[in-house]
Image (cartoon, grey):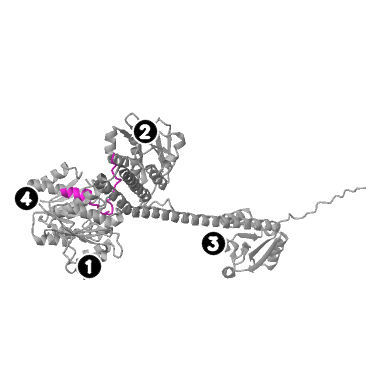
Amino acid sequence: MNDIEVDILLVEDSQDDIDLALHTLRRENLANHIFVVHDGQEALDFLFCSGPYADRNAEHMPKLILLDLKLPKIDGLDVLRQLRAHPRTSTLPVVIMTSSKEEKDVASGYNLGVNSYIQKPVDFEQFRQTVKTIGLYWLLINQRPQNHSTKKLAEPVKP
Amino acid sequence: MSETVTVDQVDVPEIRPIVRFSALLVEDNLADSELVLRELRRGGFEVTCDVVQTADEFRQKLQSTTPDVVLADYNLGSWRGMEALEILRSAGLDIPLILVSGAVGDVTAVECIKQGATDYVLKDSLTRLPASVRRALEEKQVRKERRQAEADLAKKAAELARSNRDLEQFAYVASHDLQEPLRMVAAYTQLLAERYSDQLDENARKYIQYTLEGALRMQTLVQDLLTFSRVGRNRTRTHLASDAAVREALKNLQAALQESGAVVHHGGLPAVGADRMQLVQLFQNLIGNAIKFRGEKAPVITVRAETSESEWVFSVSDNGIGIAAEHLEAVFVIFQRLHTRTEYPGNGVGLAICKKIVEQHGGRIWVESKAGEGASFKFTLPASFADGEMDHTQ
Amino acid sequence: MKEPPDILLVDDNPADVGLTREVLAASTHHSNIHNVPDGEEAIAFLRRRGKYTEAARPDLVMLDLNMPRKGGQAVLAEVKTDPGLRTIPIVVFTTSHADKDITHSYELGANCYVSKPGNLGDYFSAVQSIEEFWFGFTSLPH
């Protein structure tokens, strides 16, 4: 576990949403390794390699973080704030995916440096489509920063 | 009447070039020092000389002059001639010291030479002195020349490294900056072709077609050049399993492997010190080529490693179309291709990149092959490295 | 975001601007496209100075890096440290795919980074994807 390279870190406490997101991402073949944490504290422990994740290899940062806002223990905006404050995690792509439509949450998110803010659609099919689009956009179209060790691997070859 | 005259052999010292040098004599006996000087002059030297008696005088003299040779008595009352050697050493001076002394026995003489004295001449065998001095001066000259040669070599190596970096930088910048105008040409030619073709006659369409082909080929050439020039930026060396690198390369080649039905055997490969990305690229290019240049049969590719003294010899062997003897070296030259683009795609940069990677790791790469009989690409990697930055360009 | 949305296209190459405009014109969002050719004009537009006093606040900025006078990274540095401007999403859309440009842009606060593809079809797809993602899926700050 300590050496697996995580593609997406999903920070979400609703099991239904987790299931749907995982199902979509896997079906679209967008990510090989998706790791789920259920609250803000666990998210920070994972990313900063502390607490129960003290043995995690700090060189392996996820390529994308999908972050809910309403989380137990530490909420999403706080997680974001801490990530952006620390040089090792400050450029990690973070996409907030939340049910909140509050304008102040949107503004706070962008103010704190979230890469983008997405409202979770209520509709099942739209939710799926949203997750798929997020995956496509952030993992394929967007170019990721080099976080110390997310070195770009040799390009896959087209036949 | 002729007379034969024989001239007796006269003991004439061999004519040698007059050598001028400066000596520093460490001697408390004036008579002895005069004897030494006389002997040196008889030996064909023009010698300028200072005489000191104590350690302090010695040190002081060294501050104002740099003699070519130091001639020291072994026994100087309050101090020993060997101490002069210490003083020279701690001042970092490369000046030969010859002990000129009364009898002290062979053991002591040998001991002194072991400790760094250049030679030991007895005062009652002073005739040896000139030869000894000559040898000491010659050895010093050789040392000086070698140091100079080493400095020149280091300087040339540094210049070469800088020149290489400049070229890499140039290739990188050139290909980087070429991309935008190339995109303009390619994109708008393509738009012309797509949107105006029905307003153009056959010739115009052909002209546009050729222009577009040229632009697109330039684009891939520039990208390849960029890739080539980037090989070697930000290298780090770590201890890694070459098996894992091969597996990663195979993952990247998945589509090609499936399409060709290729089978790749690998296993038992050693751990090596290398840059991970580059090692993956190396295997990926070699295995990719083995798949690409296949013959009628499905490709069977074997990756092996053998150890040989201080290095590992890797081989990537295939059962493909092979390479004719006269081309075995050319294949590694950048942009050198052996087939037309319609026969096999590619710009001819993959093997040039492999060569660059291998050489940056301090190895060599070559190919063994016969036309029609598959090819075996081999490369070496030194067997042991410490982790860290590689500096084979230094 | 407002309807129709405003996009500020910061790019000095009219050929690329032409391509981008074509793609955006064909989309359902019918965005208003504003183009400025360099970083100084971009800042003036965003701060509504000089001839830009009536300028709309963009819902999205597409930012090239390599421009005369003031480059894209200088724009990022200024905008993302200004509390009044930093919530505006900025997509760096540029020729370079050099790691150092990518990383540096993120460090300066770029929301994302897309390299302009060399191939025409891919270029069109990239612009479409950018627009569709930011206007079709993302919630933008007002």
Q: Tell me: B122 left or right of B2.
A: left
Discs 1, 3 touching: Cβ within 8 Å:
no
Residue at 49% across / 57% down in the picture? B155
Residue marked by disc 4? A122
Circle number at residue B189: none
Name the foreground residue: B216 vs B203.
B203
- Examine the rendering and report whether any part of residue B181 can be seen: yes
Circle number at residue B318: 2
Span colored in magenta = A133-159
Name the foreground residue: B158 vs B79.
B158
Residue at 18% across / 69% down in the picture? C53
Q: Secondary structure at mark 2?
A: loop
Q: Between marks 4 and 2, how big is the CA–CA gap? A: 55 Å
- Examine the rendering and report whether any part of residue B238 can be seen: no
Q: Between marks 2 and 3, how big is the CA–CA gap? A: 62 Å
Q: Residues within 10 Å of mark 3 (few under 14, many from 20)?
A: few
Tell me the kind of residue under disc 1. Answer: Ala
Name the foreground residue: B190 vs A55.
B190
Residue at 21% across / 70% down in the picture? C50
Magenta span contains residue A142: yes
Q: Tell me: A106 left or right of B329.
A: left
Q: Between marks 4 and 3, how big is the CA–CA gap? A: 85 Å
Kindly report which numbered mark, 2 or 1, lies closer to the viewer in this rendering.
1
Q: Residue A90 at what x, y percent from top left? A: 22, 58
Residue B321: quadrant of the picture: top left
Circle number at residue C44: 1
Kindly report which numbered mark, 4 or 1, lies closer to the viewer in this rendering.
1
Residue marked by disc 3? B89
Q: Secondary structure at mark 3?
A: helix
Do circles 2 and 1 both sit on a common chain?
no
Tell me the kind of residue under disc 4. Answer: Val
